[in-house]
Image (cartoon, rainbow, N blue to C red):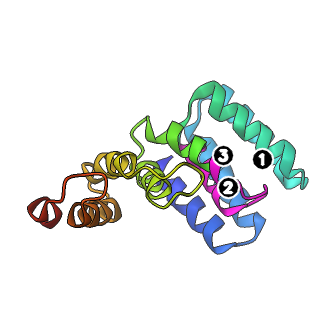
Amino acid sequence: MRALRGVIVVVIAIGLPAAVLVAVLQASLEVYNRDDATALQASLEVYKRGDDAMALENLRALAEQHGDADVQFRLGIMYAKGTGVPRDYAEAAKWYRLAAEQGDAEAQSRLGIMYNFDIGVTQDYAEAAKWYQLAAEQGHTRAQLRLGIMYVRGAGVPQDDAAAAK
């Protein structure tokens, strides 16, 4: 599922046609158990009919009921980009946090960005550094870079050139 998430992120980010997103969602059905697949299939059918609001609600229910980090991460992207929903950075932060708390490195990095730059949450450099650190420990290169910058500046962490150079 994580591999498919990357494809979905690209589809959403570059604004490819809905048919591409539908194809990716159909492919993701194969990795869900039967009940989850039924719920995801229902969301897909609603999305195909053009009912973005209902599709969103179905995906939200799937993310909330099953705690699926990949679906939570996708919802964060949808809200951050305004894809099929009004752009809502606070709601994006909520979904990124749920995925980040399950160890999703990309969600951790994006949540760090939100705290670092006052996007949808109150700016908090220490909180940004925390999320960057968690993502960086998993090898997330952009989080490593951003954490290094925070060490150079002493933002949210003690100023430490040696730590920044890691």
- For this orientation, the residue located farthest to the left is 162
Which is nearer the eye, 30 or 5? 5
Pair 3/1: label in front: 3
Is-magenta flag for residue 25?
A: no
Residue beneath disc 2: 78
SS at circle 3: helix
x then y, percent, for residue 60: 71, 37
Q: Position of residue 13 (x, y in %)?
A: 61, 69
Residue picked out by circle 3 = 91
For marks 1 and 2, give the one nearer the viewer.
2
Q: Amino acid at mark 3?
A: Glu
Q: Position of residue 24 (x, y in %)?
A: 64, 57
Question: Which residue is nearer to you in this view: 28 or 113?
Answer: 113
Prevailing secondary structure class for the magenta stretch in the rendered image: helix
Q: Which mark is residue 157?
A: none
| CA gap, disc 3 and disc 1 | 22 Å
Q: Which residue is mark 1?
A: 44
Tell me which label, 3 or 2, sits earlier in the chain.
Answer: 2
Q: How many marks?
A: 3
| Mark 1 nearby-residue class (10 Å; few <14, some 14–19, many ≥20) | many
- 15 relative to 6 in the view: left or right: right
What residue lies at 33% left-to-right and 59% top-to-bottom?
Answer: 143
Disc on the earlier residue, 3 or 1: 1
Left or right position of 158 against 146: left
The answer to which of 19 and 74 lies nearer the viewer is: 74
Circles 1 and 2, Cβ within 8 Å, touching? The answer is no
Q: Earlier in the sequence, mark 1 or mark 2?
A: 1
Spatial CA distance of label 3 from label 2 is 10 Å
Q: Nearer the viewer, residue 125 or 74?
A: 125
Q: For the magenta stretch, what is the residue range?
A: 70-90
